Amino acid sequence: MRIQVKAPELSESVQSGTLLEWRKKIGDTVARDEILVDLETDKVILEVPAPAAGILAAISVPDGGEIKAGSVLAEIETDAMAAAASAGGVVAAAAESAPAAAVPEPAVAEAGKMETVPHAPAATHYPPGRADRRVAMSRLRQRIAERMLEAQRTAAILTTFNEVDMQPVQDLRKRVQADFQKENGVKLGLMSFFVSASARALKQFPLVNASVDGRDIVYHDCYDIGVAVSSERGLVVPVLRDADRMSLAGIEKKIADFARRANSLELALDELEGGTFTISNGGVFGSMLSTPILNPPQSGVLGLHRIQDRPVALAGQVVIRPMMYVALSYDHRIVDGREAVSFLKTVKDLLEAPEGLLSGA
């Protein structure tokens, strides 16, 4: 008996995906729930398991092919006689029944593969033997590119800056780290302070948490903060739901879980949708200052940067303090400079008196 392998249901905002590389070939024996292939959408990678044990009898979509929810990807022969047959019998028949793999156009590389394209001698002055490498964008990278262009094209993006003295947060972390880790099973990092401070500031300045829909301003009564996570396949932004209700420990646990599952391709689609505000930490890569781009349709994104010891004036004295530049990019169509600057100043004030964030007061 033949069992169809179908693409899983996606979501309302994701209608199609790209089939990556088959882990099995026609004629291979497969076990129930064994992963056969990965599907890449513009938000996440999905694994497709075998619905039954047997022999992979037919492949309907080749590597790099486009799929939609419910598409038939392959067929598995589950009959006991077929499973026990030699490779020459069922495999040859299955191969004959399988449609031929589509051949990509010469200028387009197969997903995830690289194609060498020599320079045309008449068009370049490169020495002989030099060449370019052409790599097809993954669907995720294509979507990132589209959203960045959309943000630049549709929003009036402006960025305001401030700096935060991180000494109070660092001192607090050193003081409570051992007990915090023992009690919660996770280290007290920096991101949880910024998430908690942002959630409180968003309540004071709701326009930064709002979005534009045509001629309407949509105010969001929830505080779902996306945290940009860099994975091997590109940037993803999983969302902390109701961040205003989360403790620092809860935030740290969730962020650690997001980071782990982003790299193992286990994030679910619903974890990447519906954020109302975003935090991006370029400081982990050494960035000193940047102007983050909005994540449409959101109206605000907070950019964090590297902590750097700098001389600052404090109580009439020049002292060395661990300082961080912070940046808020915002949609100037609905957020005025007063709200943006005040929001960022509020975040700064909360971080420079962090005991309230730790206690939840």
Image (cartoon, rainbow, N blue to C red):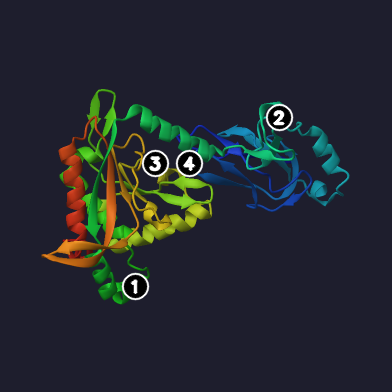
Q: Distance between the residues labelled 4 and 2?
A: 37 Å
Nearer the N terminus, badge 4 or badge 3?
A: 4
**Which residue is under mark 3?**
273
Q: Distance between the residues labelled 4 and 3?
A: 9 Å
Labels 1 and 3 touching (C-beta < 8 A): no
> Can residue 4 be seen at all in this image of the molecule?
no
**Which residue is under mark 1?**
181
Looking at the picture, which amino acid does disc 2 mark?
A: Ala
Q: What is the count of numbered marks?
A: 4
> Can residue 91 be seen at all in this image of the molecule?
yes
Q: Which mark is residue 43?
A: 4
The local crowd at label 3, few if under 14, some if 14 to 19, many if 20 or more residues have their Cα within 10 Å, is some
Nearer the N terminus, badge 1 or badge 4?
A: 4
The local crowd at label 2, few if under 14, some if 14 to 19, many if 20 or more residues have their Cα within 10 Å, is few
Q: Distance between the residues labelled 3 and 2?
A: 44 Å
Question: How far across and how far down the image is residue 38, in percent?
Answer: 60, 45
Among the 4 quarters of the image, the one containing residue 173: bottom left
Labels 4 and 3 touching (C-beta < 8 A): yes
- Residue occupying image coordinates x 15% and y 64%: 314
Left or right position of 224 against 141:
left
Nearer the N terminus, badge 2 or badge 1?
A: 2
Left or right position of 172 against 9:
left
Looking at the picture, which amino acid does disc 4 mark?
A: Lys
Q: Which of marks 2 and 1 is in front?
A: 2
Looking at the picture, which amino acid does disc 1 mark?
A: Gln
Image height of 285 relative to 145, above or below: below
Labels 3 and 2 touching (C-beta < 8 A): no
Looking at the picture, which amino acid does disc 3 mark?
A: Glu
Nearer the N terminus, badge 3 or badge 2?
A: 2
Element class at badge 3: loop
Left or right position of 56 against 290:
right
